[in-house]
Amino acid sequence: MSWKKRLPKSRDSGPTGSRLQIVLLPDLGQPLDLLLAQLSPVEREQAEQRGPTERRRRQFVLGRLAARRAAGRALVRQRRCSSVEVLTGQDGGPVVQVDGARDVVSVSLAHSGRLALACAWPNMAGEGYRAGVDLERVRPTDVARSRYAFSGRERALLARVPEGLLLAGLAAWTAKEAAWKALGPAQGFDPAGVRLRALNLAGGLAVVEASSGRPRLGVRLGFVAGPDGIYLLSLARFPLHPLPCRFSALLSGDVEHE
Amino acid sequence: MTREEIFAVLKANIQEIIPGARGKEILESHSMRDFGADSLEIVEVVSRSMKQLRIKVPRSELLEVRDLKGLLDVLEKAAAKVQG
């Protein structure tokens, strides 16, 4: 069975309705020039400044394309627009520019291996809604034992996860990274600083709190098949969405196949 | 332990763990992201390097590191404490 056939297929828009749009984009080995041609001149210039390797530039471009699509979907019911660009903001994070305006829609994006993941949501005045996504390709790692990534309390928590240290470490790290993105730049430069408080892999849920202890976020976890293996995805939302849901429902109908 | 020795350990781990860095020149001015590292690969490089160098750096000192120069500064300072 191809990886495409194993992606979620449901057309149910999920409990978030049209609020949060998620796009997952695989790297299928297209020439980099063809990918770059889909970007705006400013996006292309930023992509070409991305380090000395093609791998980095490919990931950057795929992330921008995924984010742009997610932003376009989030905008559909909000307004008509002629141009959507995803630029790099002053803090290094992605900023969506819609017809020159920057406060219309927000995005979070991630890439690992040969997949890019983005989510977008329209900004509502005074609402303070934020989301963060992350993904990691499942591969051998001893991150669960890392003193840099996890505190002693967190490592003890991971040692009790029935699915084993490898998956526990990967899931915990993606949960921390998604929550760190949702919480914003006040959390410092590194996701290691936010705190993992609970991890239920079978239930697809982690609980993470800010480095100061507040706020506390629920993070949805899920697996998806990519072109080069299985990936672990995470989605954190703030304020915490009150309805319990599976990650597969959030992805439904929003997975891009190219 | 000199800064050059620490950088040699760091570079070896970067080349082993980050596929995009293999065969590439690695400078202090680079960041691991320049080579396409994802966050997990960065954690693995830092954790393995600290283990091999037998030094411990408080996480709070690593949280603001943005490039290899910053990481080397922190590791060099920790190594000096161990030696001192």
Image (cartoon, rainbow, N blue to C red):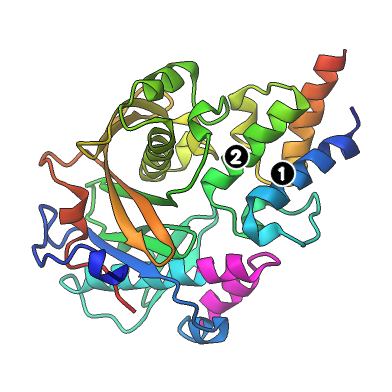
Where is mark 2, residue-wise? B44
Residue found at x 22% / y 80%: A80
Tell me if A239 is positioned left or right of B28 in this view.
left
Q: Quadrant of residue A76?
A: bottom left
- The percent coordinates of residue A206 (x first, y second) are 29, 33
Q: Residues within 10 Å of mark 2 (few under 14, many from 20)?
A: many
Where is mark 1, residue-wise? B13
Q: Quadrant of residue A189?
A: top right
Q: Residues within 10 Å of mark 1 (few under 14, many from 20)?
A: many
- Chain of the residue on which disc 1 is drawn: B
Residue A103 visible, this orientation: no
Most common SS among magenta residues: helix
**Number of marks in picture:** 2
- The percent coordinates of residue B33 (x first, y second) are 62, 54
Which numbered marker is on residue A217?
Answer: none
- The percent coordinates of residue A230 (x first, y second) are 37, 55
Foreground residue among A163 and B9: A163
Residues drawn in magenta: A40-60
Q: Is residue A42 highlighted in magenta?
A: yes
Tell me if B52 is positioned left or right of A252 in this view.
right
For label 2, the SS is helix
**Which quadrant is home to the N terminus of chain A?**
bottom left
Foreground residue among A28 and A154: A28
Residue found at x 72% / y 52%: B15
Q: Quadrant of residue B46?
A: top right
Amino acid beneath label 2: Glu
Residue found at x 12% / y 65%: A10
Residue found at x 76% / y 41%: B10
**Labels 2 and 1 touching (C-beta < 8 A):** yes
